[in-house]
Each structure stands twice: as C-alpha cells, then as structure tokens.
Image: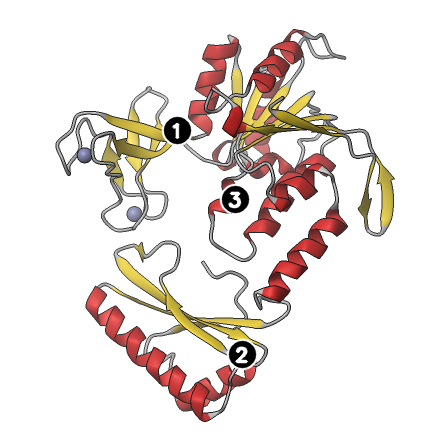
Amino acid sequence: MNYEHFQPKNYTQNNKTISTQKNIFLVNMNKEEEWNYSELLQKWIRKTLTTKWKNWNQGKVAIIVNKKWYSSGVICKSCGEIPQCKNCSVSISYHKLESGEKIGLCHICKSQYNLPTHCKSCNGDVVQEYGQGIQQVAERCEQNFKTKTAIIETKTANSPKKIEKIKTAINECPIVVATSLLNTPIQNIPFDLVVFLDADIGLNIPDYNANKHNFHFLYDTFVNHSTKNFIVQTRNPYQESIRYACKLDYQGFIAFDNEFKKQHNYPPFADLAIIMYKDEIEQKLFNKVDTLYKELLYLKEKYQMKDLEIYSTPPLIYKIFGKYRYNIILKGQKTRDFMDIVYSKLNLQKKGFKIDRMAESIV
Ligand SMILES: [Zn+2]
Ligand SMILES: [Zn+2]
C-alpha cells in the first residue's frame, strides 16, 4: 500500500478537547507512477463525483495547490538551463491568458516574457514546463475527470462581489482548485474530499519556521473544514510537520518544533537579528558586507560575546528589482545587547544597511 490512513479521534483547541471523525490518507508519492495524481486520489475523485450527496447534484472535491498560475518555469532538457528574470534571481513563471496564450511573468517585478521555443544557452529545442500551477491542475482535472472546475485564488476572491461569483461557479463545478486561501472554508460550501496535491511545498524554503508554516498549512485546513475526508500527497511521508498534522497532534508538534529551535538556537530560545545590504553593483555589495562583517567580529571579540553567532549569507532570492542582496545574521542569547553596541559604534543606517532587530525569518 502506498498510503497510511490516520483517524484522529480528537484534537485540542484553546485547551479544550474536541472530538472529531476525520479520515486522513497520507500518500507516499515516491511509490506512485503518476507524478501528480496518486492511484488513491484518482479513485476517490471518481467515486466522489459519482456519489449523489445532499442538496448538491454531485459530490464536491477541493484540490489545494499552493502555486499560482500555470507552471513554475521552463527547463532545457539538454543542458538543464532554467530562464530567469533579468531583474530578479527567480525563474520566469508561466501564466495562461483567457485567450489560451501563455506568457512568462516574473512574480516579483512583473516583467513579461515570451514562452521560449529553444534554449538560449545551448540552442536545444526541447524546453519543457515544470511545476504544476493552479491553472494547469484545473486543466488536467477537466481532461482526466471530464468535469468543470472552478479556481479560487487571490485574483478571483479578493472582493465580496468576486466571492459571490465564485460561489456560483463552485455550485456548477464538482472540482474546485484553490491556493492556501482555502485553509479557511467558504461559508455554506462543504466539500466531500479535500486534497493536498503536494504537502511538501512549504518545506522547500530554508527557514527555521518552515516546519511551523507547513504544519499549519495542513492542520488548519483539517480542523477548519467540516469535511471528513482528506488526501495528503507527499514525497516526505516521514517528515514531522506532515505527520503531526495528519494525527491532529498540535501539542506533539509544538514539542518537536521547540526542541528543534532550542537545539539550533533559534527564537524563542535566542534572539535573531538580520542586517541586510543591497546594491546594483555586485562587487560594491561584497565590499560593504565584508567590511561590516569584519567590524562586527571585532566588536564581538572586544565585548567578549563568545556565544554570539555571526555569519553572512545571501537571502533565498539573491536579486530583486535589479538589486543584489546579502544578509549578515546574528544569533544568540545576547543579540539585543550586542545590537545596542553596534548601534552606538557603527552608523549602519547611514551606510545604507537595513536592520531587522527581531527577525522572524532568515530568508
Ligand atoms: Zn539548453
Ligand atoms: Zn523580476
């Protein structure tokens, strides 16, 4: 069997124990043949769509895909090149217009690009889209399950008027494809089945709060929806944030997460400050950051802040709107005291550094 079946009987909320009846199926996608749709998922969708249910003509399925637009980018099959935005170090995502035409779009600076027909690097002509976004999932569902779909994302649900319109669409469509907006249920629209197409997506971010965000992405949806049946697809079936969520074990997760943060000296067990610098000229950026880094090490030595960690690292997205960025991260019990010294000795703001004294993320 490629899946585990969790049937948590209760969960806690505001120190109260609430009994529940949920069927949560955790599918190990490493053992599946189809990249995005497990056998179990296909079976359930077909079954749900043919079951008559209450006032609806058909059963309703919600598929949560936390990726906007059509695809994450394109990749060259010969050399592996992934085209990036000229202003930002992110891949160009693709968006499908109502006309059916696809355009490339940077999700940061919104620059537009054409869908390439060949690779700029090796001139190879096999460039393929990768990473299924919400539009592509909806399209595939329509093809595979011969049914209409509705899409819920910020663009289609950012005003009461649009929400009313979506509700009408949902009434007519057995399958709803949504971003994490659907963590919060839509009033009076229950689903027979809620699906997470890829429960690992939040774990790809190298941040100390990634586990916490991923846990809530799943757990909040399980708890907030009156739906009984959930399918969670993952390539990391033993990852703690996913397992604790499937067991509806909030306390267990908190204990695990605290232990991790304690061991690695992250807040709330230590303080984290981030000093960032950005510049259009990469060499100037390196020089500035390097000079400051040496000054900080000197102050650390001088004031004997032995257990303070200081290191420099690029953020998750190195270049944004044409500017390169670099972080200096300070972590430890006495970060705040040290930052007071830094403020009094080095005129950071005047030198163009941006300071986050109580950073909640390292990306
Ligand atoms: Zn190539
Ligand atoms: Zn851009």
Crowding around mark 3 (Cα neighbors within 10 Å: few <14, some 14 to 19, many 20+) is some
Q: CA distance from mark 3 to mark 2?
A: 28 Å
State the residue position of label 3: 202
Looking at the image, which is closer to me, 313 or 28? 28
Q: CA distance from mark 2 to mark 1?
A: 43 Å
* Earlier sequence position, callout 2 versus callout 1: 1
Coordinates of residue 169 in the picture (x, y in percent): 57, 19
* Earlier sequence position, callout 1 versus callout 3: 1
Relative to 175, 227 lies left or right: right
* Contact between labelled residues 2 and 3, with CB atoms less than 8 Å apart: no
Q: Is residue 17 above or below residue 286?
A: above
Coordinates of residue 239 in the picture (x, y in percent): 59, 43
Coordinates of residue 19 in the picture (x, y in percent): 86, 36
Relative to 283, 316 lies left or right: right
Q: Amino acid at mark 2?
A: Thr
State the residue position of label 2: 335
Q: Is residue 304 above or below residue 74?
A: below
Crowding around mark 1 (Cα neighbors within 10 Å: few <14, some 14 to 19, many 20+) is many
* Earlier sequence position, callout 3 versus callout 2: 3
Indicate the quadrant containing the C terminus: top left, top right, bottom left or bottom right.
bottom left
Closer to the observer: label 2 or label 1? 2
Q: Amino acid at mark 1?
A: Tyr
Q: Secondary structure at mark 3?
A: helix
Question: Which residue of the protein is positioned furthest toward the left in this rendering?
Answer: 123
Crowding around mark 2 (Cα neighbors within 10 Å: few <14, some 14 to 19, many 20+) is many
Q: Amino acid at mark 3?
A: Gly
* Contact between labelled residues 1 and 2, with CB atoms less than 8 Å apart: no
Rendered residue at 43%/26% (across/down):
135
Rendered residue at 69%/43% (across/down):
244
**Rendered image coloring scheme:** secondary structure
